[in-house]
Image: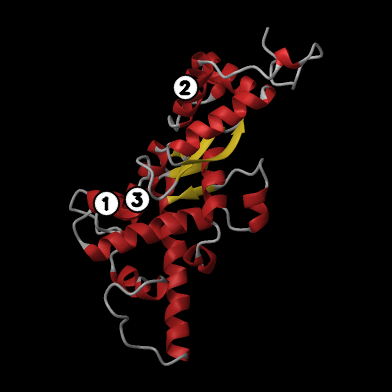
């Protein structure tokens, strides 16, 4: 009989902790694969829920699942009924979604790529405006496309005022890092750039934000809640965990 992860049995050395079986390895990999499906919730999948129970109740199985994730270049952020197996990809993981790759798919213009990155930072900062919001597992952030645009434009005005006070009225060098290089580009860009039939242009700032939030919805980080204010959204447990993981980022801290 297997020891079930509770240490040596009482009847001598023959009852050492049970060896990991190929079936256990397959189950651990299956749990990681569930974690890579961002919109899948344990409450809606009995197999996922059972594997989470094993992770919680069987330390040996939990270590095996963690090892599978590590081998794939993934970091386990949390394993719980609320978030499932929440994973973040290491920079060199095959599963990493690099902002540069995302932005290149979104636009060919290098200035726009910078704005796409800024939009993602702004959504995160607005969704969790205070450190205590980020720390509270029960907190649900709510954002809108137009609200994020207004938030960034307000930040642009503050940066412009700071530059005037410090006598820095020349444009930053192209490609310079940090928010100082982005605010002039963002402030000059039309908010909607609507076409004749009032559609939002993809290159407008609200168009860029809309693409960012659509990506976050597809990644299981946001859920759409309505059409007001350019589109309204609520955060998920997975997004909170991801933002916690990136909260030390200098640009995020400045926003």
How far apart in space, not on screen, are marks 2 and 3 (Cα)?
Answer: 25 Å
Left or right for 187, reference 15:
left
The residue positioned farthest toward the front in the image shown: 13
Q: Which residue is mark 3?
A: 98
How far apart in space, not on screen, are marks 1 and 2 (Cα)?
Answer: 41 Å
Residue 58: x and y in percent read: 67, 22
Q: Is 51 drawn above or below residue 152 in the view shown?
A: above
| Front in this rendered view, residue 156 or 47 | 47
Report helix, strand or loop for mark 2: helix
> Visible in this render: residue 224?
no
> Badge 2 local density, few (<14 within 10 Å), some, or many (20+)?
some
Question: Residue 41 has which mark?
Answer: none
- Quadrant of res 240: top right
Residue 185: x and y in percent read: 30, 71
Residue 3: x and y in percent read: 70, 15
> Visible in this render: residue 107?
yes
Q: Residue at x 55, y 23 (%)?
A: 42
Q: Residue at x 32, y 87 (%)?
A: 170
Report helix, strand or loop for mark 3: loop
Question: Residue 30 has which mark?
Answer: 2
Q: Residue at x 63, y 25 (%)?
A: 60
The reply to whether discs 2 and 3 touch (Cβ–Cβ < 8 Å) is no
Q: Is 182 drawn above or below residue 34 in the view shown?
A: below
Q: Which mark is in front, 2 or 3?
A: 2
Q: Residue at x 57, y 53 (%)?
A: 128
The reply to whether discs 1 and 2 touch (Cβ–Cβ < 8 Å) is no
> Badge 3 local density, few (<14 within 10 Å), some, or many (20+)?
few
- Quadrant of res 241: top right
Q: In terms of sequence position, does the residue under pointer 1 or pointer 2 come before the other?
A: 2
Question: Residue 200 has which mark?
Answer: 1
Residue 68: x and y in percent read: 49, 31
């Amino acid at each position: 009989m297997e020891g079930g992860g509770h240490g040596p049995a009482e009847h001598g050395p023959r009852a050492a902790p049970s060896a990991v079986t190929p079936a256990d390895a397959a189950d651990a990999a299956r749990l990681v694969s569930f974690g890579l499906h961002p919109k899948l919730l344990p409450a809606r999948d009995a197999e996922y829920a059972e594997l989470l129970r094993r992770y919680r109740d069987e330390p040996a199985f939990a270590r095996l699942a963690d090892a599978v994730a590590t081998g794939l270049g993934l970091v386990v952020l949390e394993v719980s009924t609320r978030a499932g197996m929440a994973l973040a990809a290491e920079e060199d993981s095959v599963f990493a979604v690099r902002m540069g790759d995302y932005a290149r798919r979104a636009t060919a213009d290098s200035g726009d790529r910078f704005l796409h990155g800024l939009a993602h930072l702004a959504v995160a900062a607005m969704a969790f405006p205070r450190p205590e919001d980020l720390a509270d597992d029960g907190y649900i952030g709510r954002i809108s496309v137009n609200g994020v645009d207004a938030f960034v434009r307000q930040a642009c005005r503050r940066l412009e005022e700071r530059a005037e006070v410090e006598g820095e009225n020349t444009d930053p060098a192209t490609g310079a890092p940090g928010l100082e290089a982005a605010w002039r580009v963002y402030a000059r860009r039309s908010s909607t750039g609507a076409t004749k039939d009032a559609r939002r242009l993809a290159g407008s700032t609200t168009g860029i934000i809309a693409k960012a939030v659509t990506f976050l919805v597809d990644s299981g980080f946001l859920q759409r809640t309505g059409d007001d204010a350019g589109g309204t959204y609520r955060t998920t447990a997975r997004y909170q965990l991801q933002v916690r993981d990136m909260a030390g980022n200098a640009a995020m801290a400045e926003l």
